[in-house]
Image (cartoon, grey):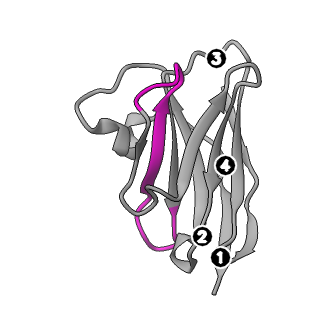
Amino acid sequence: VQLQASGGGLVQAGGSLRLSCNASPRSFDTYTMAWFRQVPGLEREYVASMRWSGGNIDYSASVKGRFTISRDNAMNTAYLQMNSLKPEDTAVYYCAADRHAPRYSGSIRSSFEYDYWGQGTLVTVSS
């Protein structure tokens, strides 16, 4: 199973980017898809997640109202639309996936929940 993240880049504060995460092979059964981000020297931070079926969309408080997670079943791809970007959103963004129901309440926000990880894509927001 491979997750391929893309779409990162340099953007000015207030701008937008859309990240993509393609899962292969197509037969891969995903239960939850998530996005995390990490600044060097800090712990990986939860950003957003959703059930591949389309429900249970969840966001961290720091991105709620600015970021939107979605997926395209036909393309086996998840997206993270990021609007109103701030310099503090600068990080390497990772997509993650698991194939089982959440281990416990709230575990979708833990990196330990996920079995598969993409390679990361760098987002830099300039002030």
Residue at screen point 69% across, 12% down = 27
Q: Nearer the viewer, mark 1 or mark 3?
A: 1
Residue farthest toward the bottom in the current orientation of the protein? 127
**Quadrant into which the C terminus falls:** bottom right
Where residue 20 sits in the image (x, y, percent)?
A: 71, 44
- Asked which quadrant contains residue 111, the reply is top left
Q: Nearer the viewer, mark 2 or mark 3?
A: 2
CB within 8 Å, label 1 to label 2: yes
Q: Is residue 19 left or right of residue 31?
A: right
- Earlier-in-chain disc, 2 versus 3: 3
Residue at screen point 67% across, 73% down = 124
Where residue 6 sits in the image (x, y, percent)?
A: 75, 50
Mark 2 neighbour density, 10 Å: few (under 14) some (14–19) many (20 or more): many
Cα gap from disc 2 to disc 3, whole angstroms: 32 Å
Q: Which mark is residue 85?
A: 2
Q: Is residue 123 left or right of residue 97?
A: right
Q: Nearer the viewer, mark 4 or mark 3?
A: 3
Cα gap from disc 1 to disc 2, whole angstroms: 7 Å
Question: Magenta region: which residues?
Answer: 38-56
Above or below, comparing residue 34 to residue 61 in the picture: above
Q: Which residue is mark 1?
A: 125
Q: Which mark is residue 28?
A: 3
